[in-house]
Image (spheres, grey):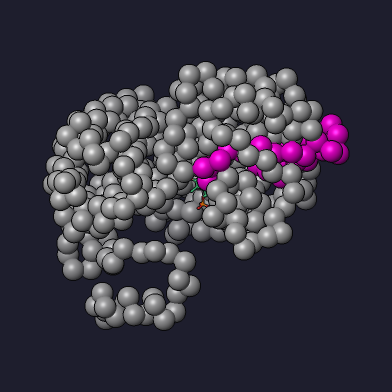
């Protein structure tokens, strides 16, 4: 029996760990860039499950691949080989220019694996080479090691003692990074484009200079592309956009179009640090998740697909700039590239209200870091859909523009 929203809210309040500050709708199904709630109300989805549903909802080839794989084999353990896993790894290696891939189930797990292999690699050079430098306002996950890597004190509070060896620098500040590095630095880990922290892109040659410092101190460069990867920047990997190759890249979110997955990909030199038994996973890389990933990996890297992201993204950014010009007291900055865009509000006062008002008007958007409206929609959205969301936002902002 279909329950009412009220019944579901009450059940959730009673039985679900209250860690999510949820919006009061119950979602039921989707198609393309649209979602429908339990009452049949339609929404334009400009969040895409937080950068996950890259191919939109109910994408035929993805649904078919998942159903066909489910009929054959959902899971069989990494004690055996499967073709979907071998195929997905081969595709990631070819696309990344790196050499070995490993699959887990989430972004946090991908970063956890990247941290482990970087530590092991550095340990062979010098057991004291263990420092990992990350950025303030970064986001790397919720496990104990990845929340420590996350440069936001609010996520650390109450979870100590946290693991040693993590230091933080301001993103885009190369001098500060240089002052922090030495031969004891095992790795520098950065989001190629910061997402959750407020949509910040690398300025000028920042990432190239980071690469040079890593080379100077024999430290590994880890790019967390869990949010910015999988075509979102207009390139398959965001690092292609900035002409810098990491030693390790991590992926998750969009990689399997909505099926839980994570991956880290490393160079051969780094891969040699791990031997059988050094790492593992029960679910990671199972044939169901990899069959889904194979559809994404056959679709998103196509030049015409990436060109669409680039075109719609720059159009969207232009429209956000117009909105900023129209509401200068409310929007103070527009940032991002491709389809990872942010509009910073003058204050955090109305962030959540604006998201809620858009929701009431049938547009799902997000506010991160308190006051940055973040747009990370399915990569298949059209200019017309951008126009719709911009119109909605314009109306909603007018309400707060005094
Ligand atoms: C979402 C995210 C993570 C964590 O991924 P989970 O799947 O939630 O564990 C890590 N890094 C970045 C950049 C992310 O956006």
Is residue 110 at all visible to an observer of this figure? no
**Residue 92 sits above or below residue 178 on the image:** below
Q: In which quadrant will I find the N terminus?
A: bottom left
Q: Nearer the viewer, residue 338 or 80?
A: 338
In the displayed structure image, the side of residue 360 where residue 304 appears, left or right? right
Q: Is residue 134 magenta?
A: yes
Measured as percent of width and height from the top left, residue 247 is found at 65, 29
- Please tell me how many numbered marks the rendered image carries: 0
In the image, what residue occupies the spot 26% across and 56% down? 353
In the displayed structure image, the side of residue 292 where residue 358 appears, left or right? left
Q: Nearer the viewer, residue 46 or 212?
A: 212
Q: Is residue 307 magenta?
A: no
The residues colored magenta run: 114-140
Measured as percent of width and height from the top left, residue 40 is found at 17, 64
Measured as percent of width and height from the top left, residue 90 is found at 56, 34
In the image, what residue occupies the spot 45% across and 71% down? 18
**Residue 392 sits above or below residue 237 on the image:** below
**Residue 300 sits above or below residue 146 on the image:** above
């Amino acid at each position: 029996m279909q329950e009412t929203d009220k019944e579901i809210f009450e059940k959730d309040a009673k039985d679900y760990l209250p860690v999510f500050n949820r919006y009061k709708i119950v979602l039921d199904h989707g198609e393309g860039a649209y979602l429908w709630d339990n009452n049949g109300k339609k929404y334009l989805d400009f969040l895409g499950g937080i950068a996950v549903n890259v191919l939109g909802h109910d994408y035929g080839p993805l649904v078919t691949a998942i159903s066909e794989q489910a009929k054959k084999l959902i899971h069989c353990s990494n004690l055996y080989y499967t073709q979907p896993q071998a195929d997905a790894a081969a595709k990631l290696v070819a696309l990344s220019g790196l050499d070995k891939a490993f699959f887990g189930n989430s972004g946090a797990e991908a970063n956890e694996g990247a941290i482990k292999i970087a530590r092991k690699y550095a340990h062979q050079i010098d057991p004291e080479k263990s420092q990992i430098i990350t950025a303030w306002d970064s986001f790397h996950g919720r496990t104990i090691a990845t929340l420590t890597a996350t440069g936001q004190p609010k996520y650390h509070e109450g979870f100590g003692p946290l693991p040693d060896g993590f230091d933080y620098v301001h993103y885009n500040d190369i001098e500060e990074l240089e002052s922090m590095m030495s031969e004891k630095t095992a790795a520098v880990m950065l989001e190629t484009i910061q997402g959750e922290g407020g949509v910040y892109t690398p300025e000028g040659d920042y990432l190239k200079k980071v690469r040079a410092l890593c080379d100077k101190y024999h430290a590994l460069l880890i790019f967390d592309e869990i949010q910015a990867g999988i075509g979102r920047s207009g390139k398959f990997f965001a690092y292609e956009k900035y002409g810098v190759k990491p030693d390790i890249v991590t992926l998750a979110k969009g990689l399997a179009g909505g099926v839980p997955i994570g991956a880290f990909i490393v160079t051969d030199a780094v891969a040699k640090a791990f031997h059988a038994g050094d790492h593992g996973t029960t679910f990671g890389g199972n044939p169901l998740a990899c069959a889904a990933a194979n559809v994404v990996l056959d679709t998103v890297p196509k030049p015409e697909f990436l060109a669409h992201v680039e075109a719609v993204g720059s159009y969207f950014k232009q429209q956000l700039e117009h909105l900023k010009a129209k509401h200068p007291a409310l929007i103070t900055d527009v940032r991002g590239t491709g389809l990872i865009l942010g509009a910073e509000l003058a204050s955090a006062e109305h962030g959540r209200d604006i998201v809620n008002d858009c929701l009431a008007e049938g547009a799902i958007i997000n506010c991160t870091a308190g006051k940055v409206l973040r747009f990370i929609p399915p990569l298949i959205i059209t200019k017309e859909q951008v126009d719709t969301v911009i119109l909605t936002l314009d109306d909603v902002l007018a309400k707060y523009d005094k």
